[in-house]
Amino acid sequence: MSDNQHVTKSARVLAVVNQKGGVGKTTTAVNLATAIALAGRDVLVVDADPQGNLSSGVGLKGARAEGGTVYEALLTDGAPESFVLATQVERLSLMPADRGLAGAEIEMVPLPGREQRLRRVLDPLRARFDDIIIDCPPSLGLLTLNGLVAADAVLIPLHCEYFALEGLADLVSTMRRVRGALNPGLEIEGVLLTMYDDRTNLGQQVARDVREFFKEKVFDTIIPRNVRLGEAPSHGIPGVTYDPRSRGAAAYRALATELLARRAAQALPARP
Ligand SMILES: Nc1ncnc2c1ncn2[C@@H]1O[C@H](COP(=O)(O)OP(=O)(O)OP(=O)(O)O)[C@@H](O)[C@H]1O
Ligand SMILES: [Mg+2]
């Protein structure tokens, strides 16, 4: 338990999104959250994907909090706190999900404020955490929309492969729609190059193209392809703690440092 629990916090909410599958969203959510928690901040990760990979990744596959999972969080009026579970990592909490969450995508449709159900649950939890990180599913459906409406900013992982930029126009236009209607302040926190293989020219070319397109929005930190990051989920342990000495773990720690430093720089008053 953290010693500063009585201090009221005001978490920044980050949604990890890319409707393309297998680009490293969940790996990024788990490891960035863990690295930030290890740096002494109270972090909540929210599993908004019916695949439940985030929950498995922190060793809580199939787990339910007192009030249930993200499914119940979206569809019932339980207290937000009742959907939060502690994990093995100090200062890291989880709002878990399992396959049942797939039903929410349909069951939310007739509900009032269907795009704002997650925000309704997460907003009161901002006072308890320094950071809230939402792992979105590989689609632009209602679950991802709920993530975009609940978030202050998005982090977009891009797999360093030939079609990395394909489909991003759809994501950008969805974000524009969300800004126009439900969440005008939604920002791009950053674009993250993942599974980078520096032995190939293709990886280097893709990295150049992405930087040309997203400019300074691209994090300097690049996540390399690293077997330890790939192995960690099968042990239910975040890569950052599974093998802290691996290149993958080092990269996610560097990402956490870069992200927090960028925010601190942005929070400074502009020079006259
Ligand atoms: N940097 C990396 N090096 C090696 N393997 C990785 C790396 N990042 C992710 N992986 C592996 O690649 C696969 C896809 O990663 P991940 O599950 O994080 O992607 P995702 O975008 O969340 O996928 P989905 O769209 O299905 O939710 C997983 O098996 C994961 O362990
Ligand atoms: Mg995933």
Image (cartoon, rainbow, N blue to C red):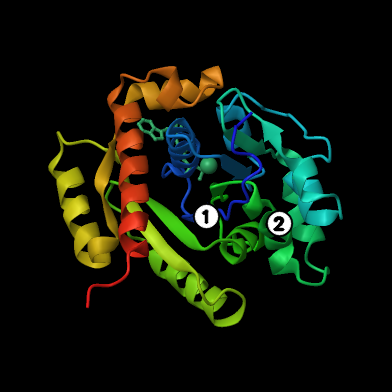
Q: Residue at x 23, y 64 (%)?
A: 215
Q: Residue at x 57, y 55 (%)?
A: 10
In the rendered image of this protein, does residue 249 appear above or below residue 131? above
In the rendered image of this protein, does residue 254 appear above or below residue 217? above
Compared across the picture, whether 41 is left or right of 120 comes to left
Q: Residue at x 55, y 25 (%)?
A: 89
Asked if disc 1 is less than 8 Å from ligand 2, the answer is: no
Please identify the quadrant where the C terminus is shown. bottom left
- Check disc 2 and report the residue beneath it: 124
Compared across the picture, whether 114 is left or right of 89 comes to right
- Check disc 1 and report the residue beneath it: 15
Looking at the image, which residue sits at the far bottom? 180
Compared across the picture, whether 228 is left or right of 91 comes to left
Element type at mark 1 = strand
In the rendered image of this protein, does residue 111 appear above or below residue 14? below
Mark positioned earlier in the residue sequence (1 or 2)? 1
Residue 163 spot, x, y in % from top left: 32, 54
In front: label 1 or label 2: 2
Amino acid type, label 2: Pro
Asked if disc 2 is less than 8 Å from ligand 2, the answer is: no
